[in-house]
Image (cartoon, rainbow, N blue to C red):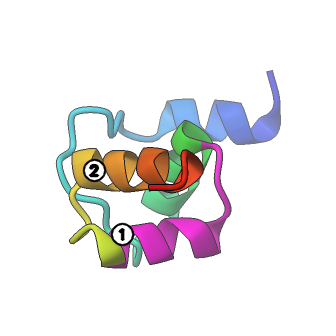
Amino acid sequence: MTWAASTLQKKRDYRKKTRIDVNQSYQVAYWKQRFGISEEELIEAARAASALARNVEVYLRDRRIGR
């Protein structure tokens, strides 16, 4: 297990969290890993999708398939 993965396991589980707070470094780390994106991409998606986790996920999926 990598240091980043073990660090994320020590933090709260954000899967049930509905909003992404890009001002909290541990949330940024979790959601970056969860979505497999960079910090800049996460911030852009959160701004575009009103920071709701499910909206960010839809936004990223739609962006990947070119909608």
Vertically, is 23 above or below 54? Answer: below
Q: Residue at x 53, y 38 (%)?
A: 34
Whether residues under marks 2 and 1 lie with C-beta atoms below 8 angstroms apart, the answer is: no
Where's residue 49, x and y in %? Answer: 27, 67
Residue 18 located left or right of residue 8 = left
Residue under label 1, please give it. Answer: 46
Name the quadrant of the N terminus: top right
Residue type at tag 1: Ala
Residue 54 location, quadrant: top left
Q: Earlier in the sequence, mark 2 or mark 1?
A: 1
Residue 50 location, quadrant: bottom left
Residue 51 location, quadrant: bottom left
SS at mark 1 in the image? helix
Q: Residue furthest front?
A: 67
Look at the image and give the residue range highlighted in magenta: 36-47
In depth, the one of 29 and 39 nearer the eye is 39
Label number found at residue 53: 2
Q: Residue at x 64, y 54 (%)?
A: 37
Where's residue 30, x and y in %? Answer: 51, 47
Residue type at tag 2: Ala
Alpha carbon distance from label 2 to label 1 = 8 Å
Where's residue 9, x and y in %? Answer: 54, 30
Vertically, is 17 above or below 44? Answer: above
In depth, the one of 66 and 61 nearer the eye is 66
Can residue 29 be found in the magenta stretch? no
Vertically, is 22 above or below 3? Answer: below
Residue 55 located left or right of residue 24 = left
Residue 14 located left or right of residue 18 = right
SS at mark 2 in the image? helix
Label number found at residue 30: none
